[in-house]
Structures are given as structure tokens and as C-alpha cells.
Image (cartoon, rainbow, N blue to C red):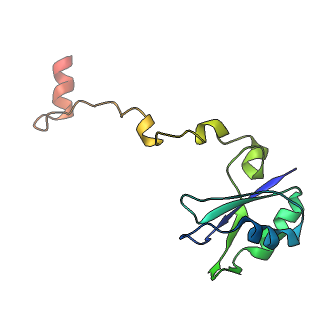
Amino acid sequence: MPVKLHVGNLDKEQAVDKEELKGLFEKYGRVSDIWVARQPPGFAFVTFEDERDAEDAVKGLNGEKFQGDNLRVQVSTNAKGKGDAGRRGGGRSRSRSRRRGRSYSSSRSPPPRRRRRDSSRSRSESRRRRR
């Protein structure tokens, strides 16, 4: 079953070359996909075909120097049938996370407004009045 790894602490000024990452990770097994963040740069996802190869890559590369920084390599928790969350069935669909044009926060409704209690009255007073 494919396993996706999150690779963090990459160069934040410019995107890392996909082929450089491929060369680094292929030492541990067959890599089926690599996605490198471009805007903003600084992380990537590397997918291994075999779970044991992915685990070996995490053990071998997490904390290793790459282009002057220590890599952070871990099994990805985002789900799309890959990584730990995919095996549990959690996570979001790709279509929702790929939406463009609107930020997530602006697409949400504002929280409902609550009535403010008159600070001069205590709760017990207002309960007595209702009875």
C-alpha cells in the first residue's frame, strides 16, 4: 500500500528541485510520486509504493542535512488513501482542499451573535423575574 511522507524544513526562499529529492529518497525504495510546494516553498510530499521503504526513509533521513538545513521527514497525516490517516479513513477529500479563489476562513459563516447580559443584573435576579 502506498505511503506518503511529509518532508519539511526545505528551502523557504525557492522550491527544491524534484529530481534532487528523488535521488535522495530512491536510496530507500521505489518512489511513486513527489510533489514539491512552490507557493510557499518549504515542504514536499514523497510517496513510496511500499510501507517498509517509507519507514526506512523516515529513519534514515529525518534530521539529516539537506541543502544546509536538517530535514523533517514523517509519515503524512493528510488522507487520500495514503499514510496513517488514509488507513483509518479520516481526512478531507482532495476537491475541498484544492479550492481556489477563496481562503478557507472567508468561506465560513461568521459565528452567531450572542445577547450580552446586563452587567448590573445577576443571573439569579433574571431567573427570579421569569418565574
In the picture provided, is 95 more to the left or to the right than 49? left
Front one among 53 and 102? 102
79 or 89, nearer to the observer: 79
Residue 84: x, y in percent? 75, 52
Locate residue 25 relative to residue 90 in the image: left or right. Answer: right
Name the spot of residue 56 as percent of width and height, x first. Answer: 84, 69
All told, the count of numbered labels is 0
Q: Nearer the viewer, residue 50 or 131?
A: 50
Residue 108 position, x and y percent, is: 43, 35
Q: Position of residue 17 (x, y in %)?
A: 69, 68
In the image: residue 129, left or right of residue 5:
left
Residue in the picture at 85% in, 68% down? 26
Q: Residue at x 75, y 69 (%)?
A: 21
Q: Is residue 127 above or below residue 1?
A: above
| Residue that sits furthest to the top in the current view | 131
Q: Is residue 109 left or right of residue 83?
A: left
Q: Is residue 104 above or below residue 71?
A: above
What residue sits 71% from the left and 64% below the top?
74
On screen, residue 65 above or below 36: below
Instruction: Name which residue lies at 48% across and 39% down.
Output: 101
**Quadrant location of the C terminus in the rendered image:** top left
Question: Looking at the rendering, which quadrant does residue 30 occupy?
Answer: bottom right
Q: Which one is nearer the viewer's eye here, 67 or 60?
A: 67
Image quarter for residue 54? bottom right
